[in-house]
Amino acid sequence: MADLTIDNVNKFYDKTQVLFDVSLSIKDGEFIVLVGPSGCGKSTLLRMIAGLEDINSGEISLGGKVINQLAPRDRDVSMVFQNYALYPHLSVAKNIGFSLRMRKVEKSIIDKKVADAAEMLGLTHLLSRLPRNLSGGERQRVAMGRAIVRDPEVFLFDEPLSNLDAKLRVMMRNQIKEIHYEVKTTTVYVTHDQIEAMTMADKIVVLNGGIVEQVGSPDELYDQPNNTFVASFIGSPSMNQIHGKVVSEKGKKYFQSKDNSLFLLPENANISEGQEIIYGFRPEHVDINQSASEDAINLKVKVDQPTGSQSLVFANVGDQEICLDVPKSHLLKPGNEFKMSPQLDNIHIFDSETGKRI
Amino acid sequence: MIRWDKRIKLLFLLPAVIWVLTLTIAPLFFSLYLSFTDVKREVVITGVEEIPVLDKDGNPKTRSDGSIRTKKVKQKELQIKYDWVGFKKYKRVVNDQEYQDAAKFTFIYVIISVFVEIILGLFLAFLFNRRIYGRGFMRSLMILPIFATPFAIGFMFFTILFEISGPLAWMGIPFLSNHNWAPFSVMLVDIWQWTPFCFLVFLAALQGIPDDLIEAATLDTKSAYKIWTSVILPLLQPIIVLVILLRVAESAKLYDYIASLTKGGPGTATQSVSFLVFNKAFKMNDFGYASAGSFLMLIVVMVFVMLFFTRLRKTYE
């Protein structure tokens, strides 16, 4: 089996450290997405798995075997590059069959495998074309075909959809998932797009500045973000995070923002009075007007962005802007006042100094 | 108004058109005409004139009978005659052993030097296509030969290869005096001067190949040789064809190195077509032969260039 284990890996470019003690364990057949802002080291980590970058310290092992010193070719991984890296002088068929030809596979087998891969990706009618005569989406599929045809232990995707337009991206997302269901190969997928991560991953790894912030399923990351970075990075629009402190009134704990607005806190929360915290709630986890609780606060609509049945409403708590994702209503127009209370079950509390979840 | 603008455009083109017509097209057709003629320079006596004979002081001498002494002088005029001889000159050129030898030498010279330049250029480009200390400086140093005057380079190599006291004299190799070595020496000069050009173009082309293509290939093979033959060389192919084209067209005109290094010798061992043609025209006054010889070579080079151009166009389509 091909479990992929990354153990305390560090990476330096000259004297700059770009990865700090990264450890991950990826089970056979899992679809892992490395996500993070640009420069967070996610592509570097992927390239280290592929063998395109040296590993300064730590170990990467595949199927129990350390592959640090193995040449990329011997690692049994195949990679889809951001710009597809198709050989411009070779036809689609030759591009897909390239890795097999390099491995001196018999020609009849190559032809069969290429035909199968083309079939799976809907490329059969394009096999004799050159890459420059293909559209972006078609090139992307050829790049995937090139990876699939080898039947490797691990697929590596380096932001494969970033050059496609939005519509095509959604389609390709589905196709990649379908292929993963079909071939069930361990997949490591790098993206800066958290929606791609949320929709595709079995497990998401959030990287920031070369450090793993959190590893977990999309739901875990969404419901239980470890810290403020993950909380704001995962989910769109981002989680509202308000700075303030804990106060007690009438035997209940409240969160008091800088402008003295009071938000009710869950009773079981492990916080003490006077503690500086960051109070977080997602835009969709709020009740407004009639459904709002008795502790609701009054806000004034700054901007509203209808998105169909819902509407994104922006308002200010003190000088901090918050965003609310609520059912569309004629009452929520700029200048109107409304009542709002975050849902008590879905409140996230973070330490204001460390940003860690409390 | 618009029409006037268009005419103005044509007017601005005029200097260039005149330049091309007078300095390229006209001489081209004139030499084509020359190749079908026998050019003769003759001194023709156009008449006789009687002039007085003068003494030391410049006064006319007189005979005893008092009449002025005269002498008869022939009036001469240099006339250039173009006798139309059809393909006679071409026949002569084709059957001329000297021309055949020159063509053979030029052919071998072009093949070998261009081949070596391409291979060496590729190799150097390969070496330089990575981060090495002082690469920029080394690269500038490498391409210096391109800027030197070929004629001067010929003289420089003449001093280097000088067999009696030159710096390579200890090798005891008759670089310039042996009919087997001399062609090699000339090729050496060409290779020395033009490998840097190939190197420069190939280096630029190599740096234009996206890294991820090479990385994609390293995921499939460990052998650098395979990456070269199956990825890099096919990608460089259009550039290689272009460089071959430029180098063949250029080196087929070989004249400068010969004129300054070997003078075509020993014997006629290093006599190139251009050198032979030049001598025929301007030392032996056989312009018909020279023009015919030049046109024959032009045709051969043009056929070659056309073959390569179609090849090039195919790879780009």
Image: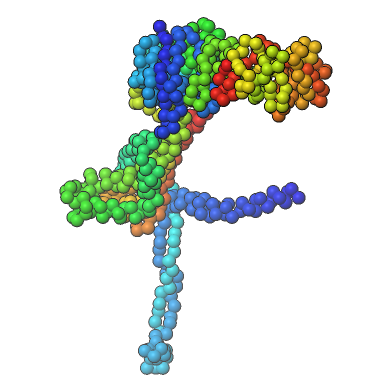
Residue B16 x, y percent position in the rendering: 57, 52
Q: How is the image coloured?
A: rainbow
Identified at 82% across, 18% down, the residue is A331
Q: Residue at coordinates 52% horizontally, 20% vertically from top-left? A: A213
The front one of B94 and B133 is: B133
What x and y, as percent, mark residue B159? 26, 55
Choose top left, top right, bottom left or bottom right for residue A321.
Answer: top right
Q: Provide residue A304's location: percent of width, then percent of height.
A: 76, 22
The count of marks equals: 0
Vertical side of B3 occupied by B50: above or below: below
Instruction: Say left or right for A299 vs B67.
Output: right
Residue at x-position 78% and y-position 17%: A339
Camera sees residue A98: no
Q: In this orientation, which residue lies closer to the viewer: A3 or B23? A: A3
Rendered view: A131 above or below A62: below
Residue A268 in sight in this render? yes
Residue at the image position 38 percent from the left and 41 percent from the top: B135
